[in-house]
Amino acid sequence: MAIALAFGLTALRYPIGDLSRAGPGLFPAMISGMLLVIGVATVVRSFLVEGVPLEFNFRNIGLILASLCGFAVISMYLNMIAGIIFMVFCSGFAASSYSWVRNAKVSAGLIVMALALQKLLGLNLPLY
């Protein structure tokens, strides 16, 4: 909430404009306002809901980190489609139940999204 306030108050120094002709301060003010609302809602909810102890599963943290690092390396040296497939199947081991069918569906969805970003928005993604 403090970060949202800091950016929001700084954004108010710039001209806001209106929605039809936005100034440079409108977008940061809106985003910081939304983050502030989310922060306040989280704090209020924390007083109303019973606390749950936080448990660290270092195996799962390691699997997620390995899948992200593998995605970066495979995308750099091979292609991004192979990196996406590796990331999904490797991070799937951190789930409570492993399903290769679910992983294949998630991989296909992410590949379709990456293709859409490449073809429709013109992003320079090394997909193949």
Image (spheres, rainbow, N blue to C red):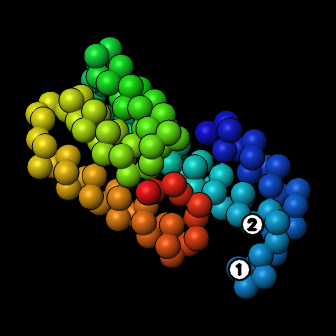
Q: What element carries label 2?
A: helix
Residue 43 appears in the rendering: no
Residue 102's x, y, as percent?
Answer: 15, 49
Figure label count: 2
Viewport quadrant of the N terminus: top right
Q: How crowded is mark 2: few (under 14 residues within 10 Å), some or many (20 or more)?
A: some
Q: Please tell me in which quadrant of the rendered image residue 29 appears.
A: bottom right
Query: Which labelled disc corresponds to residue 19?
Result: 1
Q: Label for residue 26?
A: 2
- Between discs 1 and 2, the one toward the N terminus: 1
Front residue of 47/123: it is 123
The residue nearer to you, when weighing 84 against 11, is 84
Q: What residue type is labelled 1?
A: Leu
Image coordinates for residue 66, horizontal then vertical, percent = 38, 25
Q: What's under tag 2, amino acid-wise?
A: Leu
What SS does tag 1 mark?
loop
The location of residue 44, given as percent across then percent down, is 44, 40
Nearest the camera: 120 or 64?
A: 120
Locate residue 21 relative to residue 54 in the image: left or right.
right
Q: Is residue 126 visible?
A: yes
Q: Are marks 1 and 2 in contact (CB under 8 Å)?
A: yes
The answer to whether residue 23 is left or right of residue 83 is right
